[in-house]
Image: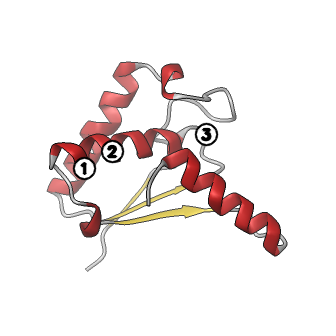
Amino acid sequence: PILSLGCMRLQQAWGTAIKTMDDVTPECQENLLNILRYAADLGVNHIETARGYGSSELQLGEAFRTLFESGELKREDLIIQTKVLLRPTASVQYSREASRSSSSIT
């Protein structure tokens, strides 16, 4: 089965105020890591975010890097989904690449 965790509210800030992880407080990022650990313990295997969720993609990318490198989670065990605005093809491709760049998840 697929169990999902929506990450709309799991970010330091809405909008574009957060540009890099230097703008995220350690407490906020540690909270996100603990939420992901707890979700994994419950069997959650689908993580959902979006370009419009403030710094969510950036923070999730960093959190997953931490959890993958520590061996706590495996990339192949997760479905990681982000949403983009539906626009002409060139815009969708740009949004997709911007999401990949922001989250650093492949």
Residue 40 relative to residue 65: left or right? left
Q: Is residue 94 left or right of residue 62?
A: right
Residue labelled with disc 3:
54
Q: In the rendered structure, are the residues bearing label 1 and label 2 in contact, judged by CB atoms less than 8 Å apart?
A: yes
Q: Residue 65's mark?
A: 2
98 sits left or right of 71 in the view:
right
Expressed as whole percent of the image width and height from the top left, the position of residue 29 reads 37, 30
CA–CA distance in space, label 3 to label 2:
19 Å
Q: Earlier in the sequence, mark 1 or mark 3?
A: 3
Residue found at x 62% / y 29%: 19
Q: Tell whether 56 sits left or right of 30.
A: right
Which residue carries the number 1 mark? Answer: 68
Residue 61, given in percent of the width and then of the height, sits at 43, 46
Rendered location of residue 79, percent (x, y): 37, 68
Q: Secondary structure at mark 2?
A: helix
For mark 3, give the secondary structure.
Answer: loop
Instruction: Where is residue 54? Give x, y as percent.
Output: 61, 39
